Amino acid sequence: MRAWSVVAPGPVEGGPLRFAGKPVPVPGEDELLLRVRACGVCRTDLHVTEGDLPVRRPGVTPGHEVVGAVAGLGAAVRGFAPGDRVGAAWLRRTDGTCAHCLRGAENLCPASRYTGWDADGGYAEYTTVPGAFAYRLPDGLDDVSAAPLLCAGIIGYRALRRAAPPPGGRLGLYGFGGSAHLCAQVALAEGASVHVMTRGADARRLALALGAASAQEAYAQPPEPLDSAILFAPVGDLVPVALRALDRGGVLAVAGIHLTDIPPLRYESELFYEKELRSVTSNTREDGREFLARAARYGVRATTHTYPLSRADEALRDLKAGRFDGAAVLVNDPR
């Protein structure tokens, strides 16, 4: 099969990815083999490719927003049949026995494993997913529209819950890419007033088109104090900016798996008055199921830009440079 591999992690402009042949994977006893139909391009894929995340599987195939058709099943898999359309997401496996798993916080499992980092992902013609971690996808969503929901959507949803905006609250979003533009739709549907701070003019236009109350440059102050905020951009310099924008008792959730260094914080102006700074770590399967149900109920739709599988490296370069709004999605192009 054709697949991309991270052969030498480094700046994506330098060609760390190679597009070549790999054997079609053999599913484990509890796994599904998927024929990949579409795979979203996530900023975490960029972090894996550029080495911001340490190498866990040399030559790994990135991609963890996978929509595929079941092409094979391990002997222990139940509830799926060949041809079923399913999704594979970032969280691939947990031990199910640690204290975190047992209290419903499997996203914190020390033995957790991830698609496109610990195991080959969806920048390929085939991939595998444990049956217990595969998602059934809502009807009425085509493959390209569904792909970004499987990480950008799920993580944005968890970040929204971590930010805990009050009913009718004022929510700030810093960065407005694949995850934020899906999170915004959920927040708006639930009655929040959304203010967007982001570098891209196209992204600001998209935010306003989706119903945001305002959209301004990334370092600008919103027009009113915020009850909650989410930092999607992996820019540590924005943490004190966002904290200063919070009203008393406000919460800032940092949604990314990677963040540049945070500068020193001034207690009186940035943390005092019971403001909170929270991180977001992966997601639970329950987060995924809740989000997909809400996405169907609220009519959440990704703004997508498609690339053939053979141009995955270009898609990552465009993501890094902010050349598109919404989300990029790879589709398996004909040979």
Image: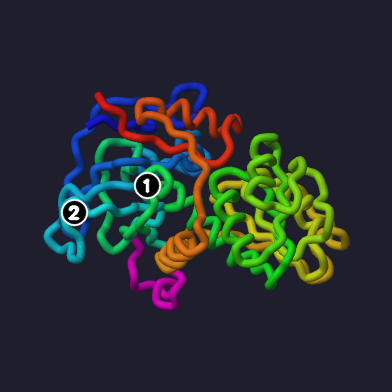
| In the depicted structure, whether residue 75 falls above or below residue 219 | below
Residue at image point 74% right, 46% down: 215
Judge left or right: residue 163 versus residue 122: right
**Which label is found at residue 142?**
1
Which label's residue is closer to the chain start, 2 or 1? 2
Residue 108 visible somewhere in the drawing: no
Give the residue furthest to the left: 75
Please identify the quarter of the rendering in which residue 1 is found: top left
| In the depicted structure, whether residue 81 falls above or below residue 50 | below
Badge 1: few (under 14), some or many (20 or more) residues near its Cα, within 10 Å? few
Q: Position of residue 262 (x, y in %)?
A: 71, 48
What's the CA distance linking mark 2 and mark 1? 28 Å
Give the magenta-colored segment's residue range: 93-108
Which amino acid type is marked by label 1? Asp
Give the residue furthest to the right: 268
| In the depicted structure, whether residue 300 falls above or below residue 101 | above
Q: Position of residue 32 (x, y in %)?
A: 22, 53
**Which label is found at residue 28?**
2
Which amino acid type is marked by label 2? Gly
Residue 158 visible somewhere in the drawing: yes
Residue at image point 15% right, 63% down: 76
Judge left or right: residue 248 versus residue 314: right
Q: Position of residue 306 (x, y in %)?
A: 44, 33
